[in-house]
Image (cartoon, helix red, strand yellow):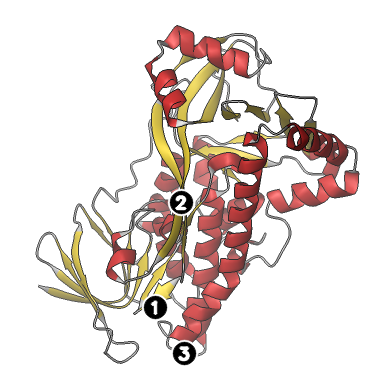
Amino acid sequence: MMRDFDIVILGGGIAGSAMALALAKNAGSNTLNIALVDGGSLEPELPDVQDTVFDPRVCALTEASRHLLNNLGAWPLIEQLRASPYQGMEVWDANGTGNIAFSAGEYGQPWLGHIVENSIIRGALLSELKKTSVHRLSGVDVQKLEIDSGQEQGAPVRLLLGDKTALTAKLVIAADGANSRARSWAGIPMREWDYLHHAIVTTVELEKPHQETAWQNFLDTGPLAFLPLPSSSDGRHFCSIVWSLVPDEAQRVMELDDEAFCRELAIGMEYKFGAIVGTDKRYCHPLRQRHARQYHRNNVVLVGDAAHTIHPLAGQGANLGLLDVAALAYEIDHACERSEDFASDRVLDRYQRSREGNNLAMAGVMEGLERLFHSDNLMVRWLRNSGLNLVDKLPFLKEEIVTRAMGMQGDLPELARSRRAL
């Protein structure tokens, strides 16, 4: 059976579901015939939110991301389910005196961002998507993507699904993650390298409150971040943690029993929360930086992790992906309004120009910070400690850092700005 679409989106994660919803709600593109394809379920299976059970995967959402989710109609449900605003951020170097602290109140803001579990974001997006005309093809994998590089621009791409269904599309949007098969099929090359670190993630229970603050300590072994989660109804306190370690050390930490693991976390956080009194299951994954050498080729365009991955140091990966979504949705929407071919190189080049520089800049900053804080050179250690303390004493520079980190500066795509929901 053959089914024809204007746009097929591969991958129903946060980026893919947000992409489908943005195209379905924008005035210019909402008449397009769109399919969202995923090997798993695309039902809005909202998590059973128990106040002591958390998804180990979380996002530190910026204001720009919150605006986008609100404009798509998903934020009210996210807020209703569970979102943890944080008002402060503190970063310090365990090997010196360097320290910098940010407070939302200093800049007239109610918060710096929100910590939200991935499953809640995805569930809210899919719940809103169900109200649209987007075709959701779930439980099927794409087995083959056929592209004839010699065919005329705009000719359909053909996709063969695992259930033998064939789809055609004028444009395929690859939101199928860091190991994107669509990217490989389209012949889009990558720049990538291994950070030689693994990230351990889990949820932990604290003896003392986290003070609605995100905490990050740069240890000898690697950065350790504690991200605040909502307290339980009976007054218990929780954080999501990300600990970046060299592989051998990560293996050692993964093999610790819960009591020893909690003890090392408490030491790593210098007992700011007293004891770590409990931990959920731990997960470990290798860290790699990737960046596509081009964002589109042969009627396939990349968004989110399919286009780029960065170090989780500042929790910016999901935010960059959502800005990709907002930028591509804008270009497709305006192309439709101008009766322009939305799959043309001209339109997709505009998308690439709007996002590539910002994504590369963020990747460069994360790479620089990672190298800076892993250096054992005494001069480098002195400079980074002096730098942290200097920035902490310069209000104008701190405000610049905060507003950029919150996604409140720069040329933001329309969907990522504050306005009414679509």
Provide the secondary structure element on which disc 1 rests: loop
Q: Distance between the residues labelled 3 and 1?
A: 14 Å
Q: Which of marks 3 and 2 is in front?
A: 2
Q: Quadrant of residue 382?
A: top right
Report crowding for label 1: few under 14, some 14 to 19, many 20 or more residues within 10 A (C-alpha). Answer: some
Q: Do the residues labelled 2 and 1 touch (CB within 8 Å)?
A: no
All told, the count of numbered labels is: 3
Residue 134 visible to the viewer: no
Q: Position of residue 250 (x, y in %)?
A: 44, 26
175 or 180, nearer to the observer: 180
Q: Do the residues labelled 3 and 2 touch (CB within 8 Å)?
A: no
Q: Nearer the viewer, mark 3 or mark 1?
A: 3
The residue tagged 1 is: 31
Q: Which of marks 2 and 1 is in front?
A: 2
The residue at 45%/27% (across/down) is 54
The residue tagged 3 is: 340
The residue tagged 2 is: 193
The residue at 40%/36% (across/down) is 285
Amino acid at circle 3? Glu
Query: Relative to residue 17, is residue 339 depicted above or below?
Result: below
Q: Where is residue 251 in the image (x, y as percent from the top left)?
A: 39, 24
Q: Pick the quarter of the image with the C terminus.
A: bottom right
Query: Relative to residue 396, is residue 247 depicted above or below?
Result: above
N-term mark: 3 or 1: 1
Amino acid at circle 1? Thr
Q: Quadrant of residue 253?
A: top left
420 or 168, nearer to the observer: 168
Q: Where is residue 236 in the image (x, y as percent from the top left)?
A: 56, 14
Q: How far apart are marks 3 and 2 (CA)?
A: 38 Å
Provide the secondary structure element on which disc 3 rests: loop
N-term mark: 2 or 1: 1
Q: How far apart are marks 2 and 1 (CA)?
A: 41 Å
